[in-house]
């Protein structure tokens, strides 16, 4: 009981003078949560889908990087052969 009393006294002292402002903060937080809570199931689904999309890109990334590397090689070859292409 002594430790609980000390804890509650410390909490009361830290909140002293905040009365109305603290109460309004609680009301405002509750209003925000009233808006957010109904959207949580959709947010969870979206996050799961985002994770699945990340897995898809992770699986495809070696092929994508190979494509980009091949594109660089092709571009360099075309650039090196530009005079021949201009003459054709």
Image (tube, rainbow, N blue to C red):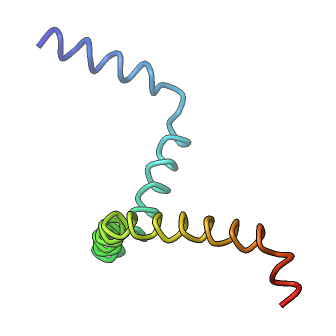
Q: Is residue 79 above or below residue 1?
A: below
Give me the residue at 59% from left, 71% from top.
71
Residue 75 screen position, x and y as percent: 69, 71
The residue furthest bottom is 88
**In the drawing, does residue 66 fall left or right of residue 72?**
left
Residue 73 screen position, x and y as percent: 61, 65
Which one is in front, 49 or 56? Answer: 56
Which one is in front, 44 or 30? Answer: 44
The residue furthest left is 1
**In the drawing, does residue 15 fall left or right of residue 40?**
right
Q: Is residue 37 above or below residue 23?
A: below
| Residue 44 location, quadrant | bottom left
**In the drawing, does residue 70 fall left or right of residue 80?**
left
| Residue 88 location, quadrant | bottom right
Question: Which quadrant would the N terminus be assigned to in this image?
Answer: top left
Which one is in front, 23 or 48? Answer: 48
Mark count: 0
Residue 76 screen position, x and y as percent: 70, 65
Give me the residue at 81% from left, 83% from top.
85
The residue furthest top is 2
Q: Is residue 43 above or below residue 86?
A: above
Give me the residue at 47% from left, 46% from top.
23
**In the drawing, does residue 8 fall left or right of residue 16?**
left
Which one is in front, 70 or 46? Answer: 70
Give me the residue at 35% from left, 72% from top.
53
Q: Is residue 20 above or below residue 84?
A: above
């Amino acid at each position: 009981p002594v430790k609980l009393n000390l804890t509650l006294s410390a909490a009361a002292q830290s909140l002293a003078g905040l009365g109305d402002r603290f109460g309004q903060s609680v009301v405002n937080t509750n209003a925000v949560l009233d808006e957010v809570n109904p959207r949580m199931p959709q947010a969870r689904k979206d996050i799961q889908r985002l994770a699945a999309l990340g897995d898809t890109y992770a699986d495809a990334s070696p092929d994508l990087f190979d494509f980009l590397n091949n594109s660089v090689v092709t571009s360099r070859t075309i650039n090196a052969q530009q005079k021949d292409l201009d003459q054709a």
